[in-house]
Amino acid sequence: MPDIHIHREHHLGFKEARKVAFSWAEKAEEKFDMECTYEEGEKEDLLTFTRTGVKGTLLVDAHQFEMKAQLGFLLGAFKDRIETEIGEQLDALLNAPHPSAKKPAADKKKAATDTDAGKPAPKAAAKPAAKAKKA
């Protein structure tokens, strides 16, 4: 049986890594009709996934993701493609902004005067006040 082994280091911490693993499991269930079982632990979680032709695990902790999978005979012919796609999915999830991540500070507004010409900047047109809706 062809084996897949994917390892990814991360700096998300355990809580965020768990969210990424849940997200991956949801996508695997939807896109590949996988049956996923998630077991939470104190220091690491274990995601077990299976479907006809594939079975494997995803070990999740505060510093890494470790995926191991065995492909059946028919899917074995597509091992490289499957391994690449799973790696890309994990990379995308690991690099995606997470809701708990801090947002960058807003840019400061431009000064009231145009420093190049020494003239005051044009004033913005006044916006009409919003009308209150009556119930």
Image (cartoon, grey):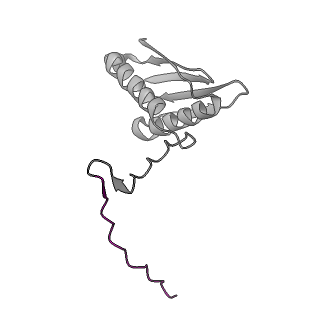
- Residue drawn at x 27%, y 47% is 116
Q: Position of residue 129 (x, y in %)?
A: 42, 79
Q: Is residue 60 left or right of residue 52?
A: right
In the rendered image, the vertical position of residue 78 relative to residue 127, given as above or below? above
Q: Position of residue 13 (x, y in %)?
A: 62, 28
Queried whether the magenta region covers residue 7, the answer comes back as no
User: Which residue appears farthest toward the front when viewing the image?
Assistant: 118
Viewer-proximal residue among 54 and 7: 7
The answer to whether one can see residue 52 in this image is no
Q: How many marks?
A: 0
Viewer-proximal residue among 41 and 122: 122
Q: Is residue 120 left or right of residue 14?
A: left
Q: Position of residue 74 (x, y in %)?
A: 34, 20
The answer to whether one can see residue 127 in this image is yes
Queried whether the magenta region covers residue 134, the answer comes back as yes
In the rendered image, the vertical position of residue 14 relative to residue 99, given as above or below? above
In the rendered image, the vertical position of residue 36 relative to residue 82, given as above or below? below
- Quarter of the picture holding the N terminus: top left
Span of residues in magenta: 118-135
Displayed quadrant of residue 46: top right
- Residue drawn at x 51%, y 43% is 103
Q: Is residue 32 left or right of residue 56?
A: left
Displayed quadrant of residue 61: top right
Q: Position of residue 99 (x, y in %)?
A: 54, 44
Q: Is residue 127 left or right of residue 95?
A: left
- Residue drawn at x 57%, y 29% is 12
**Magenta residues: mostly which secondary structure?**
loop
